[in-house]
Image (cartoon, rainbow, N blue to C red):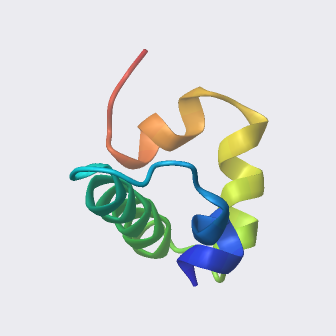
Amino acid sequence: MRDVSYGEDAGTIRTGTGPAVMAALRSFAIGALHLAGFPNIAAGQRWSHSDYANPLSILDLKM
């Protein structure tokens, strides 16, 4: 799922703990979108790209 939604295989981070950290962040984003009730990741990505404050609202952060 991460490769299809986030293009993980095309990433340029290849050394150190970078790949593991990015995989964890992508997994966190997928989990947060599922908990927010999105039926699929593509719908959640479209919603999050429409306004910078949308992803923060999932975490209940105010900007």
Residue 28 rendering spot, x and y as whole percentages: 34, 62
Q: Residue furthest top?
A: 63
* Quarter that holds the C terminus: top left
Left or right placement of residue 14 versus residue 20 in this view: right
List x then y, in percent, for residue 22.
38, 54
**Vertical placement of residue 53 versus 29, above or below:** above
The correct choice, above or below, for 62 with respect to 30 in the image is above
Res 6 → quadrant: bottom right
Image quarter of residue 50 = top right
Q: Residue at x 31, y 49 (%)?
A: 18
Q: Does residue 53 appear to the left or right of 10 in the view shown?
A: left
Position of residue 32 relative to residue 34, above or below, is above
Quarter of the figure that contains the N terminus: bottom right
The residue positioned 58% from the left and 38% from the top of the image is: 54
Q: Quadrant of residue 42?
A: bottom right
Q: Which is more toward the observer, 35 or 16?
A: 16
Q: Position of residue 37 (x, y in %)?
A: 52, 74
Nearest the eye: 61 or 5: 5
Image height check: is 41 above or below 1? Answer: above
Q: Name the foreground residue: 20 vs 16.
A: 16
